[in-house]
Image (cartoon, rainbow, N blue to C red):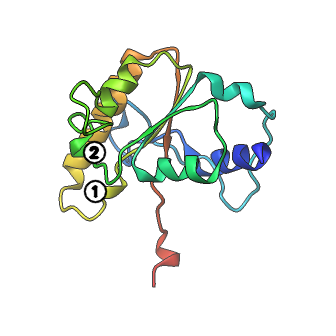
Amino acid sequence: MRTYFNKLIVLSLLLVGCSSKTNTSEKSCFYVDKFNYNNPVPYSDEVDETYFDNTLIAGDSRVGSLVLYNKLKNADVKFIESLSLSMFKITKIEKDKEDSKTLYTYIMDSDKENIYIMIGLNEIGLNSYEKWSNSYDNLIKEIKEKHPKSNIYMLSIYTVENAYKL
C-alpha cells in the first residue's frame, strides 16, 4: 500500500510552475515542462513510513480524500472542504473553535521538512486568470520564504491538452 501511495504522489505531484512561458524571471517560481508524460515515472528510492513523520499535507477536500483512502497515520494532514485560494488565509481549519488557525497560518507555523499543498482548483471557473495566477504565485513565494529548507510540493492542477478536448 505504501509503495502504491508513493507512486501516486510521484504521479500526481509537480513542483509548480508559474503557468507562463514568458517573463519567468519576474515570478517566484519557474515554468516546469520537462516530464514526458508518455514515459513511465522515473525511479526513485522507496521511502518507508517514517518519511511521513516529517510531512505536512494541506489543502482542500481532495487532500481529505488522501486520508480517507490511505493510512497516513504519521503524516500531519489538514484540509478544509471547498477551500478556495481567495479564502486560504481567512478560513479556519476548525470553524467551531474560536482559537482555530487558518490553513495558511498552520502551514507557516509548521516545522515539517516536506510540505504538500493542494489549493486553487476551486477557482478554475473564474474569469480572472491573472488574479488567480498572481495570488498563487504570491502564496508560493511566502511559503518558500518562511520555509527555505523545506521541500515544498504543490499538487498539480490537471490540464487538458488541445488533442484531448471534445
Contact, CB < 8 Å: mark 2 with mark 1?
yes
What residue is pinned by disc 2? Answer: 85
The residue sitting at 39% across, 26% down in the picture is: 107
Q: Residues within 10 Å of mark 2 (few under 14, many from 20)?
A: many
The residue sitting at 31% across, 37% down in the picture is: 94
Q: In which quarter of the image is residue 105?
A: top left
Decide: is 1 above or below 47: below
Residue 20 seen anywhere in this rendered image of the structure = yes
What residue is pinned by disc 1? Answer: 123
Q: Foreground residue, 16 or 1?
A: 1
Q: What residue type is labelled 1?
A: Glu
The residue sitting at 18% across, 62% down in the picture is: 127
Decide: is 126 above or below 25: below
Q: Residue 80 carries which label?
A: none
Q: Foreground residue, 122 or 165?
A: 122
Residue 27 seen anywhere in this rendered image of the structure = no
Q: What residue type is labelled 2?
A: Leu
Q: Foreground residue, 11 or 56?
A: 56
The extreme front residue here reads: 96
Separation (CA) of disc 2 from disc 1 = 7 Å
Expressed as whole percent of the image width and height from the top left, the position of residue 113 reads: 56, 19
> The C terminus is located in which quarter?
bottom left
Q: Foreground residue, 15 or 122?
A: 122
Precedes in sequence: disc 2 or disc 1: 2
Q: In which quarter of the image is residue 102?
A: top left
Q: On the rendered structure, is 15 left or right of 133? A: right
Expressed as whole percent of the image width and height from the top left, the position of residue 164 reads: 52, 77
